[in-house]
Amino acid sequence: MTIRVLVVDDQYLIRAGIVGLLEAADGMSVAGQAADGEEAVRLAALLRPEVILMDIRMPRMDGIEAARRILEHGATAAVPRPRILMLTTFDLDAYVYQALRVGADGFVLKDTGPTRLLAAVAAVAAGDAIFAPTVTRRLVEAFSRTVPGGEPLGGRPVEIEQLTDRETEVLRLTGTGRSNAEIAGELFISEATVKTHLNRTMAKLGLNSRAQAVVVAYETGLVTPGGPA
């Protein structure tokens, strides 16, 4: 199966370099290119790529708003939603936090080497995490307290009261940076059961990614910044 990627960056040389890298890689192809967020939203709907590499800071519409609009269209069994990887200069960045908050699947640094960039695209296309959960936690801890109180996630209020006790516990442990295997060991259940609970939690709360689930765990108070892991 070939992974079709939409490359979005307003800087031509960076965009051209990524396009050349993807076209030369086995199992990947470039579905299209965009120079700003507005064009990215249009092409995402038209081309239906599996992965979108999206720059955060662009003219007309930035990558955060573009990601939000792309993800709000939802997905179907026939057309799953694209996985969105944000391209950024700094990992501990408020813009990256906001991107994860609206549902982006992760981020890669612009100075990432070719091998790691291709591995990140392949991993996120397969639904896997592209970095250690502790990286997400470090980012969320740095910026979760800067979000205005009461601001809904992705335009929707988050109501964790609808979760079962087990789903709430799995969400809390996800927020602390634990992997599915670590959660399974702590709760004495299988990894498959952990995945089922997390998937149900994300469906109930309207979440798009594991990273977004970590954000929810902090913003609802299940996990406290600086608290125990």
Image (cartoon, grey):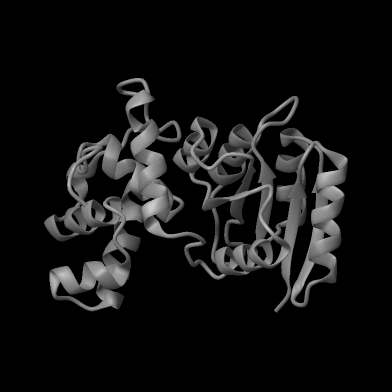
Q: Which residue shows up at 32% across the image and 27% down it?
A: 145
Taking the image as shown, residue 108 lies to the left or right of residue 36, namely left
Query: Can the viewer see residue 207 in this picture?
Result: no
Q: Quadrant of the N terminus?
A: bottom right
Return the x and y of residue 202 as percentages of the image width and height: 35, 54
Q: Is residue 94 above or below residue 169?
A: above
Q: Depth check: 100 or 68 in front?
A: 100
Q: Residue visible at 84% across and 70% down? A: 24
Q: Is residue 89 left or right of residue 189?
A: right
Q: Is residue 155 visible?
A: yes
User: Percent position (x, y) of residue 165?
Assistant: 12, 55
Q: Residue at x 72, y 35 (%)?
A: 37
Residue 190 percent across, percent down from the top left:
23, 78
Instruction: From the top left corner, tell me how far across and down residue 58 is, in percent.
Output: 72, 31
Residue 62 occupies which quadrant of the picture? top right
Residue positioned 31% across, 51% down in the render: 204
Could you tell whether 104 is left or right of 140 in the image? right
Residue 208 versus residue 214: which sits nearer the camera? 214
Q: How many marks?
A: 0
- Report the front residue among 39 and 10: 10
Residue situated in front as seen by the camera: 17 or 32: 17
